[in-house]
Image (cartoon, rainbow, N blue to C red):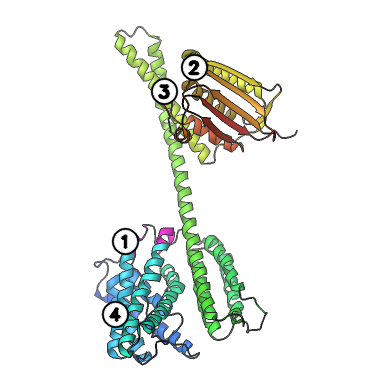
Amino acid sequence: MSLSASADAPLIPPAAKPQRAIRTTGTAFGPAHWLGANLAAALGYCVLGLAVSQFFAVYGLFPAPIWLPASVAVVAAMLGGIRLAPGIFIGSFLVNFFVFSASFPATVLISLGNSLGPVAAAALLRHFRPARGVFTRFTGVVAFILCNVLLHPAITATTGATAIALANDLTLSQAYSVWVQWWLCDSGGTLCFAPALLLLLGIEREATDEGQQAFGRNLAIWIAVAVGAIALFATLPLPGAIPWGLPFLLVIPLSWVALRISLRAAYSLVSLVAIVAAGATVAGFGPFQDPSIGNPLQLVGVLIVLLALTVLTIVSLVSELREAEAASRAKSMLVAAASHDLRTPLNAMIGFSELMRSETWGPIGNPRYRKYVEHIHESGLLLVEIVNGVLDLSKIEAGRRELTIRRLDWVHVAEACMRLVSPQAVQKGVILSTRAVPGLVVDADELALRQILINLLSNAVKFTPAGGHVVLHAATAADGCIDIEIVDDGIGMDAAGIAKALEPFGQVGGEGGGTGLGVPIAARLAALHGGALSITSEPGRGTTVRVTLPAPRDE
């Protein structure tokens, strides 16, 4: 690089990347290891710098529209941090001094920026890096972009532009132009190559490994996409032959590869497409040579950014979703196992307390013991209710609650539920009643429908004072759906109370007992039927819970 170059000809900037906290402690390796790693970093930087600069020099581009050695600097910084800064510095020094013929002071300043920029970005990324890996979380991808694609090139561009401005007495606008070109050069080089190197070298992990049993098929798909991309940009610039927007459709097969094979395979393709697109476009080939396009290389940059960010974002979001699903399955299994283990001693506790309450084997004696036995019995029943509710809810949320839909006579189901709830209503002094259109039928799972009705009726009785009314009625709506309503003139609730009542363990009001699971379970069971549950209420004016079920099918 020569400092006599104009502001329109910025010299090569190396890259920088944030450091990753992966087994890079000072005691892990000896001096020989770090010496070898620095030599490898310097060699990789030099070879890529020489190849890229020589290729683009043939077409009069100085130093290059995309500086691939930036990826080497990024990977080295994430692998070894400050310990590999000397290797990055040496590689940058050799390329700038011998290939671009920069002066010694300018080369030192540029190389300092090219080595310290990636190290600083790596150190910052370490604080934001997700524990499971940069590319396994969307926040990790964002941190990677901010640190390595924005911050690191900004540091290298600042030192590089400063070196050129001092040597050539540039104006502020000229120096800014150099800075922008330098920043784009390093940013593009980092984005198109560094993630692939990090994954291929195992420095960063991905959420799922490639399935070995499908290796042959996956390899064939990878090769087909690669050959198609190369062929796309190997075409001669014939007007109208290939629409210039066609390369952007590569986002579809690349996304498929990322999701069905691996991120490593997909980003290797992104790197291949980036190199082929840049090289072919500079050489005058490919669909971006359309006469209507003013700056083909600008479209190459847009293509690289689109492919890279799409692949990284899709994989990170899917990774989060899969881990959330796995955690949910594990939670459901734990809840099921815990519920089973809890019910056994609870049933024994309830059974023994019932024997003591009935004094089957003789009088208890002290009245306090009788009171304690009553508390034990009531607590045991409440715990069983909670365990059963949690188990039901976990089954529904895990998708393991299966329904057997059949034609049901509404009157038969409603009367059965009213009989079960009536003792509770009689004890509280609440009047229960039901009404329905004669001959009304419902297509539903009988056990689930009874559970919905009993949960909602019990809830209505609990929050209705003595002398109040709870009415259960059903009718066919105008669209053929079945509307079931439980109406009470109890304490009612406001909007916040309604939202809380629909949440698991959400309890409204100060009435005793209950688990806070009845309404949420009823809502989820209604949704499983393809219906819905809604609540209308007002403080002091009662509550109406409506369950809408799909219209009965024609027989």
What count of labels does the image hold? 4
Location of the C terminus (image quadrant): top right
What secondary structure is marked by label 1?
helix
Give residue 359's quadrant in the image: top left
**In the rendered image of this protein, does residue 455 appear above or below residue 80?**
above
Q: Please state if 521 lies on the left or on the right of 77 as rendered.
A: right
**In the rendered image of this protein, does residue 465 appear above or below residue 336?**
above
**For discs 2 and 3, the disc positioned in front in the rendered view:** 3
Which kind of residue does numbered mark 4 sit on? Answer: Leu
* 3D distance between C-alphas at marks 4 and 3: 72 Å
Mark 3 neighbour density, 10 Å: few (under 14) some (14–19) many (20 or more): few
In the rendered image, residue 18, in percent from the top left (x then y), is placed at 34, 68
**For discs 1 and 3, the disc positioned in front in the rendered view:** 3
Callouts 2 and 1 close, C-beta under 8 Å: no
Q: Tell me which label, 2 or 3, sits earlier in the chain.
A: 2
> Residue 511 got which mark?
3
What secondary structure is marked by label 2?
helix
Mark 4 neighbour density, 10 Å: few (under 14) some (14–19) many (20 or more): many
**Extreme residue toward the right, this view:** 555
Residue at (65%, 31%) from the top-left corner?
Answer: 482
Which kind of residue does numbered mark 3 sit on? Answer: Glu
Question: In the rendered structure, which segment of residues is drawn in magenta?
Answer: 125-140
